[in-house]
Image: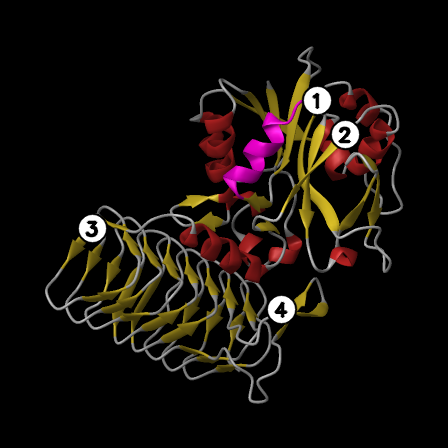
Amino acid sequence: MKVVLLAAGKGERLEPITHTRPKPFVPVLGETLIERNLRIVKDIVKDPDIFVVIPEEYPREYENFFSRLQGVRLVKQGERKGTGGALQYIPKFSDDEVVIFYGDVYTTRNSVERLISEPGNAMLGIEVPNPSEYGSLQIDGEGNLRGIVEKSPNPPSKVINGGIYKLSSSILDLVDSLEISPRGEYEFTDALTAFAKTHKVKVVKSNDFWRDVGKPWDVIDINKAELDSIPGRIEGELEENVKIVGKVIIEEGAKVLSGTRIEGPVFIGKNCVVGPNAYLRPYTLLTGNVKIGSFVEIKESVVMEGTKIPHLSYVGDSVISEDVNFGAGTLVANLRFDEKEVFMNIKGKRQGTGRKKMGTVVGGHVRTGINVSILPGIKIGAYAMIYPGAVVNRDVNRGEFYKG
């Protein structure tokens, strides 16, 4: 079986996380989203032949990641935009079936396995309470696809396009004949709709957790879901007087120093150092080589590799990218005075996060001075520097030196 993972999206809505990493490389506990999806596919499909579509210009360290994987071939997408455009670069093959997997989709292994085991053509359908925000599926009485209605105020069903398909390889012939959509892209869903007129495409419905990882707070949600789905284990080193309550995962090489309190579920990745006298609250996720120091409190946040939050700081409901350093006393506010929903700028538009508590999203390699305060819903671009004592009350641009 051939498997195609589409990983060429820019991820502009995920900025500033994607200032320094491609969208499919957002972390999921101790691995990345694309590593997780590849692992699931390889567990389910015996000896799959995998194509991963990436942009022509791709960070070298991430391109090198694929060169170390067996059975994975890179395909570079040229100027043709969109999911259909990406598939036009796939070499032709004679296999009967192909699995197409959007690179920014997170769902359960169970959902993927049910889809792939379905006989004949199939696609994943996800039942959601807000189908008008997605591509809603028109489904006939036998459970087969009739069409896809994109972001309609009157969606035909509560079942949306889950972004994973198992189809006859003849779908690729229709992809080659696609025309530009009103959005200026080649849309795979246009080919799928045409395909469904002459082929039965079973909609495999799932109520399992699913997320199209398109906004920064989605990174928190998928890590919470993944953490909830696996058992606790302690492989790292614990000093005396460490208090653990609930489920924790502490990976090999990690150290938790004396006086630290951990309230699970919590994930502490490889070679992290926590404490002494730190406080990790539920859904703290330290992906690897993270330093959390004395009198630091972290709650429901994803802290990426190599970041240092050494002393006297609070971080709540936030995403902190790689190689960030917080000066002493850096504080993140995660609750508005009026306790209403926190909004965030996404591609220049104010958008509700759906969260009453939402802190900050910090890009890679950011530095803050001492006694910095960051207000709810603020984004700080990669490589920015925040002056000591500043109150960050607006988004900070990539590379900006912010004095407040």
Could you tell me residue 53's position as x and y percent? 63, 31
* Relative to 18, residue 356 above or below: below
- The mark found on residue 201 in the picture is 2
The image quarter containing residue 331 is bottom left
Which residue is at the front of the view, 245 or 346?
A: 245
What's the CA distance linking mark 4 and mark 3? Answer: 35 Å
* Relative to 152, residue 330 above or below: below
Q: Are marks 3 and 1 in contact (CB under 8 Å)?
A: no
Sequence-wise, the earlier of marks 3 and 1 is 1
Sequence-wise, the earlier of marks 2 and 3 is 2
Give the residue type that dot 1 points to.
Answer: Gly
Residue sitting farthest toward the top:
94
Could you tell me residue 80's position as x and y percent? 77, 34
What's the CA distance linking mark 4 and mark 2? Answer: 34 Å
**Of discs 4 and 2, which sits in the foreground?**
2
Q: Are marks 2 and 3 in contact (CB under 8 Å)?
A: no
- The mark found on residue 236 in the picture is 3
Classified by dominant secondary structure, the portion drawn in magenta counts as helix
Q: Are marks 4 and 1 in contact (CB under 8 Å)?
A: no
Determine the secondary structure under disc 3: loop
Residue 332 seen in this snapshot:
yes
